[in-house]
Amino acid sequence: MISDHVYCLQADDTGCIWAGTFADGLAVRIPSEGSFKAVSAFPNLENKGIGNIARDENGRMWITTNNSVFSFSPDSLGNPEHINTYIISADMQSFFFNRNASAQVDYGRIAFGGSNGLMIFTGNRTQPHQTRLPIVLTDFKVHNRSLRTIPARERSRISLRDIDYTDAVTLTHDRNNFFIEFSMLSYANPRDHIFRYRLDGFDKEYVTADSHHRFASYSNLSPGTYTFRLQAAGENGVWSSNERTLTVRILPAPWLSWWAWTIYSVLLLVLAYGVVRFLRYRLRLRQEVQISKLERQKTEELNHAKLQFFTNVTHELMTPLTIILTSLQNLNNGTGDNQTLYGVMSANATRLMRLIQQILEFRKVESGNLKIRVSHGDVVGFVRRCVEAFAPLVARKQLKVYFRASSEQVDGWFDPDKLDKIVYNLLSNAAKYTPDKGEIIIRIETGDDCSVCISVANSGELMPQQTIDGLFRRFYDGNYRKHHTIGTGIGLSLVKDLTDLHRGSIRVSSDEQDGNCFRITLPIGRDAYTEEEIDDDTGDDAAEKIYEGAGEFVPVQPDAAMTDTPSRTRTDHTLLVVDDNEELLLLISNLLAPYFRIETASDGEEALRILSRQPVDLVVSDIMMPGMDGIELCRRIKQTFEYCHIPVILLTAKNADESRIEGYNSGADGYVTKPFNLQLLYAQIVNQLRKLEILGLHFRNQPVFEVEKLEYTSMDEKFMRQAMACVNAHIDDCEFAQADFTREMNMSRTILTEKLKSLTGLTPAAFIIDVRLRAAYHLLEEQKKMRIADLAYASGFNDPKYFSTCFRKKFGFSPKEFIDRLNEKGDKIA
């Protein structure tokens, strides 16, 4: 069922069952379907309640509501056809139809019972036919003002014709409340006239009105175009075939009109265009800023790389230059072995020449002016001589160099100068990264296509792929090179450029089997080069050995002017010299050896190991070293308690103020720039050692310990206060000796002894006596009158005579004489 509130049922001739409900109005059940469906052919029938459903003799179905009667003829599908509508007139508004009160009357009539009796509908009305009825609009009101009373000028904006003849009206947005009155020009039973109307775009269904309610009212309509449709039915209840229409157009507000929207659209497009332009401008500006930032960053990185390059080049140049100048000073002073010094100078001059040539070659590569001149020669013999010339440089690290060739002689065309630089840089690079007692293997193999392959492999730490990818970049400063060696950063880049210029290729591999291996493949056929690049005049002489070995060093005598030494003898002072350049390290060691005990280290890590196992009085260190540099070494020394008192002198090729400030901030006590005068270095060493002795002398000459007047570091000051407090805590204990003092200080006897000797010039036993004597001196100043024996026992001495002897030795007068002086001074004051 459609609804639980079914008031009546009736079957028609087709077998359909019609049901009257309250909520759903009229429903029908077709025999072929199993359920009821609502019938929507009757407007405003829902929620009115159907009281009667009846069928007359002609098969027409009749239904009644409270005050309406409808008749229709159903088709086979249950659709109502030929609907007639009957409305109770206004003077019978109190009349209503009773439920289930219907009956067929003779002559084809049908009667329905109501509150005021029966209403009979005659059979001649059961055959309706549509006719055209004269429907008119009698009035049109806007805001309760009739169109006819509105002034003509204002009325013309609404409609140019009277409401009787017009088909359209136009209203503004603020006149969207209107009233339409209508009628039918028929005088036969005018009380039985009924009307139905609908405003398309607003009403969903037709609205039925009787002859006493001939009007339609609408308010607050939205802007738009509406069509008012009006139909009428005469006394037979048949709707006319014609309808009266009126188009009602409500204009939008000016700010919502089409031209306003056009302006809005234009403004929106302009705004969107402006926003897009602005966003594009901002994006372009941001990209330009980002590009500028990247360019600036790249420029800064390049400048930093170039600065680092020039710094490294300066270091590379200053080291051999220092060795040469120092050797010249010794030759001038007539000291040292001339032949050895000549060998040193020759080797380092050759090294300088190679560095300068390398920089010049790099400059030619940068400017595109580098050319090759190939000549005919023996490739194997040439490379062998290059390796033999390089042998003295690798001998110092005890490296094993192997040369292997697939043939004893391979003739071909090559540029001797370029090939020499390629081999030298590859061997130099291998020597830098090969650990002591490691291996370097040079192989030469010939190819089938008139080419030769030269490979240089070395043992040592393998390179990651990231390092391999950046090896041939100019000024490349990878993490491995930062922590292992110092160089110009252009060697491998120059190798790559020279190889490309020689029509060759270079490959790098790093694995457990071959180690770090560089493979150079060069064409050696004449056809590989142009006629301008071939030099027929030169022969095998071009392949002569270019590099001469450095020779070996022997000890040389220091300058005779170096006679101003500290008070302690040569064996009393130990110097630690730290430098990654073995030639300079050996030269400085030999020149200083007659005056000091010399220990050497090639880097900061080795220097710290030496400091941890033996006493050192002073450290001389180069700044630029692989691994731990001189700045870090100085900082580590000054931050370590056991040897923070040791003076540090830094050697460097950097002479800028920033470099000096960095060195002094790390705690350096002296700073010498390369190339340096050895006498200046010697004077710095003597001065620092003298300062240590003066510091101990000042301590010993103080009657009362005042740490503020002594130039101690913070850690040394803390140590001295602790040592003084430790002895003073046992000042009257005659049994408190050096072993007890060492145990109380919680450190080894060696460290305690070296620390006290460096800061005070005293051994631990002498330091204990010194503190006891200071305490006695202070006690006499307070007491002024005291027995010498009591003073000795109170100061920790068990022998008054020994106490008096020690007191006189330290202060220059005996305890009795000091008492007399104090008493005389007191009498004068009185």
Image (cartoon, rainbow, N blue to C red):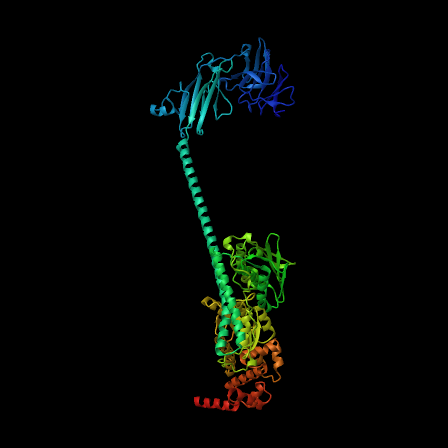
Residue 619 pos. (x, y %) = 54, 73
Image quarter for residue 5? Answer: top right
Which residue is the extreme one toward the top?
107
Q: Nearer the viewer, residue 117 or 97?
A: 97
| Above or below for 648 versus 175 | below
For residue 606, which quarter of the picture? bottom right
Residue 801 in sight from this viewpoint: yes
Of 654 and 407, the residue lying toward us: 407
Is 652 above or below relative to 479? below
**How many numbered circles are shown?**
0
Question: Looking at this view, is 818 or 570 the one in front?
Answer: 570
Q: Position of residue 613 (x, y in %)?
A: 61, 74
Q: Is residue 253 visible?
A: no
The residue depicted at 52 percent of the width and 84 percent of the height is 778
* Relative image position of residue 669 (x, y in whole percent): 50, 73
Query: Residue at point 44% right, 19% down?
Result: 182
Report x, y in % for residue 167.
42, 20
Residue, x 45% and y 13% (percent of image)? 186
**Which sits in the foreground, 804 or 391?**
391
In the rendered view of the protein, which quadrant contains the C terminus?
bottom left
Q: Quadrant of the N terminus?
A: top right
Q: Is residue 494 above or below residue 196?
A: below
